[in-house]
Amino acid sequence: MSSWIPLWLHKLGSPPTFYRFAGKLRPWMLALAIVLGLVAMYGGLVLAPADYQQGDDYRIIFVHVPSAWMGLFIYAVMAVSAFIALVWRIKLAEVVAMESAPIGAAFTLITLTTGSLWGVRMWGTWWTWDARLTSELVLLFLYLGVIGLYHAFEDRRQGARAAAFLALIGIINVPIVHFSVNWWNTLHQGSTVRLFGPSTMSGSMIWPLLTMMVATKCYYVFSLCSRVRADLLSLESGKDWVRRIASEEHPG
Amino acid sequence: MSQATLGRACAAVLQRDLTLAWRRRGDIAMPVLYALIVTTLFPFALGPENALLQRIAGGAVLVTVLLAMLLALDGMFRSDIEDGSLEQLVLAPQPLALMLGMKILAHWLTTALPLIVIAPMLASMLQLPATAMPVLLLALALATPMLSLLGAVLVALTAGTRRSGMLLALMLLPLCVPVVIFAAGALAAAQQGLPWIAPIAWLGAALALALVLAPLACAAALRIALDA
Amino acid sequence: MTPFLAMGGYAAYVWPSYAIFLVVLLADALAPVLRRRRVLRELRARLARQAARQQRHADTPNDA
């Protein structure tokens, strides 16, 4: 590969090195996620004043919106590593792409359920065919398709490559779905409720939101690290470094 | 490779698939029968009021045709994978994307075309006004090739797996959402007497893009799914 | 404390949202831990079987 990529990046791509690196990174990221998450929840649930229109109901925003951002962000990460996996055939990129999918699906699920909990008061029903909610549902189906295809293959690496291809098709599809769903929504009702505009967001509401966003990012890195570690162990179970780990933990 | 041999290869693939399909005529009738059954069930479920049926007719016919196509999609490459002729096609000197394009065309001719032919009958069973009928046919003529092309990519991806029926539906849903939205949007506009050319134009643009890209993606997907 | 828990009458919506957020992420965090444990257990069992087989071969040299 080209010489502009530093050597440590090549080394990081080798499974045992990444396993150790992820093991070191994991607890720090978890601690950061918990601390920032607690701060954000305190700021959002206690410090931020109630909204003058929605009362305390709007406090769902502090888990709903960061989860929605993460759903999209993780899909983008998955697509980028899927691209790397398909072009350069790097095993670690396959693992990262495939282990990102369940985390992204979890965040999308959170977005959908908290969104519908919010919607009970906003729209009067649990589910409405609102443009964003519908796009989010389609995103969940995209995630489930990638996970399902990955597990349908007997050969894990072949499954990862096929699912990576599907993830790339999906990333082209996401903007198209968003555009078409928006068009469809204006066609049929044209009354999308603005959940929040820039004018109604005060600073005391913004900072818990941004803090929670950083916390969920840290959580993603943590979860990805532990998932990739577990996956590398089972993928490389024939190798020496894995045997050493197996005999070191719980000897006998 | 000369132009002539390429043309002959395309014709051979097309002819082979059409001949195989003709030998199993019963399979061609299956999606048509399925669409007929589903359409018959709608009035029983919703009540036979003409006004209500008229309102849902366009969308119901579209979704029925889509599901009928999904039923047939699973078998697109099935027999070719089982008897190994698909691997021969991968190894052949002719460009794989073009050959797959021919296979998709054959599949569209044998599954979607019969559905388009009976679509006016299904639609009139649900009281779709005659004025909207040309738009229905136009929307189907643009939407069904899209579904065949998109479906072919996904079928190619699942080529290496044992069972894929439900998975295929799950993977196809996000891809066919825009197609359904624009096709049904054009129909609804036509029924209300509004201009319907914009969604049809979008569908046409998407089809032009898919005609070029989908066979290439299909070939790439097949190479991934078959290298063991 | 009570008015805080009541959330201005929206307790039935706010608290379940936070609960879902925490429960889903907790499940997501526990899944790889359990999986790692299972993978290592299976690997150790396989290594033990291999060792036993080698042991047996060493005990009974093939004199047949």
Image (tube, coloured by chain):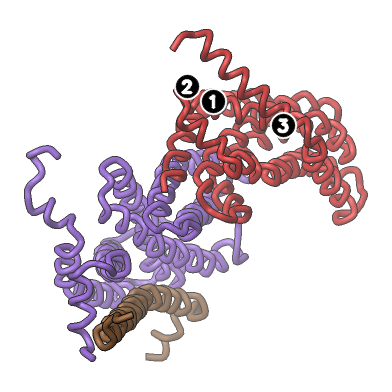
- Looking at numbered disc 1 in the image, what kind of residue is underneath it? Met
Marks 1 & 2 on one chain: yes
Residue A228 left/right relative to B142:
left
- Looking at numbered disc 2 in the image, what kind of residue is underneath it? Gln
Gap between marks 2 and 3, in whole Å?
21 Å
User: Circle 2 marks a residue in which chain?
Assistant: B
| Label 3: few (<14), some (14–19) or many (≥20) C-alpha neighbours in 10 Å | few
User: Circle 1 marks a residue in which chain?
Assistant: B
Residue B204 position by quadrant:
top right
Mark seen at residue B20: 3
Colour chain B is painted in? red
- From this view, report whether residue B53 is shown above or below residue C32: above
Task: Name the N-terminal-most of marks 2 and 3.
Answer: 3
SS label for mark 1: helix
**Chain coloured purple in this rendering:** A
Residue B9 position in % (x across, y down): 56, 18
Residue A51 position in % (x across, y down): 40, 67
Q: Nearer the viewer, mark 3 or mark 1?
A: 3
Mark seen at residue B94: 2
Gap between marks 1 and 2, in whole Å?
7 Å
Circles 1 and 2: CB atoms closer than 8 Å: yes
**Chain coloured brown in this rendering:** C
Q: Residue at x 59, y 42 (%)?
A: B176
Residue at the spot of label 1: B99
| Label 2: few (<14), some (14–19) or many (≥20) C-alpha neighbours in 10 Å | some
Classify the position of the C terminus of chain A by image quarter: bottom left
